Amino acid sequence: MNKFTTSAVSTSANVRSLIASYLSKSALGAAIAALFCLSAAMTSSVALADNVAGDFSIGSNPNGDWSYGWSSTLGSTFNLDSSNTASAYGLSGLEGWFANQSVTHEPSVVYNSTTNSIFQPSFTTYQPGQLALNLGGNYYSVVRWTAPSNGLYSVSATFSGLSAAGDSTDVHILLNNGSTFNSTVFGSPSPTS
């Protein structure tokens, strides 16, 4: 099977309509969220579509075509997150997977499963249906999408900052651990596709 990995290396990033795996890492080690949505469509006679936020689940890892985890460097060994919660950071409705690689249990992947905004003091607001990746010291937070079969796939992504304190992050889309897209997000929301 082909593995597609979309990743963002960041202190904070927001991603809408994207497919694959996302990495979040801060040189400062600050615990700032990265918002992420991912979608893919197969470009054959049978159209398939996946969406990282819409398909998110704390029920299992991997979850269908999606896996939630972390790596120590961009494109290095992928490790599955080891614990899940329905109340990340003590916030009801903020579901998540945690790697437990730091004192605050990050890196992590969290999702606002409610129809209301969830505020995490003092700078981060998770909008309804948004997926966020949080760095963990020197570790990347990763969401990985694995193609269900060989074929041609269309991947689209928009990354932007999530924290009201401002963001600066590198973003990358990887295919089989090789970079196919590189950019930087400055400020919030300041999207890049």
Image (spheres, helix red, strand yellow):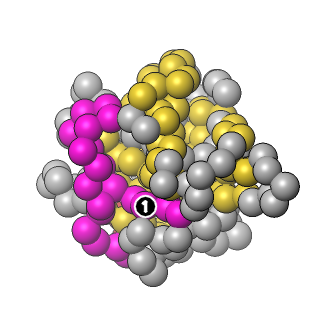
Question: Residue at 60% of width from left, 41% of height from top?
Answer: 15
Residue 63 placement (x, y as % from top left)? 48, 71
Question: Residue at 20% of width from left, 60% of height from top?
Answer: 100
Residue 127 placement (x, y as % from top left)? 64, 55
Q: Is residue 29 magenta?
A: no
Image quarter of the C terminus? top right
The vertical placement of 7 against 87, above or below, is above
Residue 158 horizontal side relative to residue 99, left or right: right
Nearest to the observer: residue 58 or residue 190: 58
The vertical placement of 124 against 118, above or below, is above
Is residue 162 something one can see in this rendering? no
Residue 11 placement (x, y as % from top left)? 39, 32
Nearest to the observer: residue 114 or residue 185: 185
Q: Residues within 10 Å of mark 1 (few under 14, many from 20)?
A: many
Question: Residue at 35% of width from left, 46% of height from top?
Answer: 141
Q: How many numbered marks are there?
A: 1
Magenta segment range?
65-86
Nearest to the observer: residue 119 or residue 98: 98
Q: Amino acid at mark 1?
A: Ser
Is residue 192 something one can see in this rendering? yes
The vertical placement of 59 against 100, above or below, is below
Residue 111 horizontal side relative to residue 68, left or right: right
Question: Residue at 60% of width from left, 32% of height from top?
Answer: 160
Residue under numbered circle 1? 67
Q: Quadrant of residue 72?
A: top left
Residue 61 placement (x, y as % from top left)? 39, 71
Identify the element where label 1 is drawn: strand
